[in-house]
Image (cartoon, grey):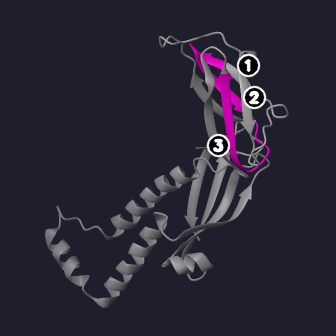
Amino acid sequence: MKSITKDIIAYDDFAVLDEDNNNITGLVTGDFTFGLYNPSDIEVSSSIPVTIAELENGLYRASFTPNAVGDWLLVIYHATYFDYGKAMNYECYEHNIDGIEDLALESTSQAIKTETDKIQPDIISSPDDYKADVSDLATSIEIANLEVLVKRILGLTQENFRISDAVYDSNHLLTSATIKIYSSSSDCENDINALETYSMTTVYNSEGEMTSYKVVKN
């Protein structure tokens, strides 16, 4: 199921082939019929237009603009090549969150590297120092510090991870939010005893494409 955003054009691509798997070119919107079903399971293609544009060599793109949050179904029919219909399922959200999770994971990887670099000994150049550092970890203070570090790393990999105070621009794109990580699922569920708090900010260009993404510990 593809994720789409309310009041923003949704796209889906498909190929048209004949029975010998040859690409069929030159088709236009009028060559197809549609069944577009909103989250209330009402057919709405008469009020929400579906358009078809050929991208290249028999590859086409269907588009429509959803006006409600929930599950949508688009079925495209062609009397000659697929009278049974091609079905496309969508999950429509109020706001655009595409790419945030991937960027968060990328940022998380860098954060984990930074944290582990702080405690990683130089084994090659100073093996004796490495042995001393390992023995020092037996102290209660170092063990406590290591426990906190592990919890922070787990939080940054989105275990017991919470996003709040989300702010969106006029295009429904997420521009800032607060990220909190917790030591337990119970604390996360009740939003108490946050282990760390971070501020997330994003910047988009005029085409609505994200140009920067930043997460800073408060």
- Measured along the vertical axis of the image, is residue 117 above or below residue 208? below
Is there a contact, CB below 8 Å, between mark 1 and mark 2?
Answer: yes
Stretch of the chain drawn in magenta: 54-77
In percent of the image, x 79 and y 32: which residue is there? 45
Quarter of the picture containing the C terminus is: bottom right
Q: Relative to 4, is 140 on the left or the right?
A: left
Q: Distance between the residues labelled 1 and 2?
A: 8 Å
In terms of secondary structure, where does tag 1 sit? helix
- Measured along the vertical axis of the image, is residue 202 above or below residue 11? below
Q: Relative to 46, is 99 on the left or the right?
A: left
Q: Give the mark nearer the N terminus: 1 vs 2.
A: 1
Residue type marked 1: Thr
Is 14 in the magenta?
A: no
Instruction: Report the residue marked by disc 2.
Output: 50
In terms of secondary structure, where does tag 3 sit? strand
- 200 and 35: which is toward the camera: 35
Q: Distance between the residues labelled 1 and 3?
A: 20 Å
Residue type marked 3: Tyr
Residue 186 numbered mark, or none: none
Q: Distance between the residues labelled 3 and 2?
A: 14 Å
Quarter of the picture containing the N terminus is: top right
Q: Name the spot of residue 14 as percent of width and height, x first.
A: 58, 25
- Measured along the vertical axis of the image, is residue 35 above or below residue 126? above
Q: Give the mark nearer the N terminus: 3 vs 2.
A: 2
- 141 and 70: which is toward the camera: 70
Instruction: Report the residue marked by disc 1.
Output: 29
Instruction: Report the residue marked by disc 3.
Output: 90
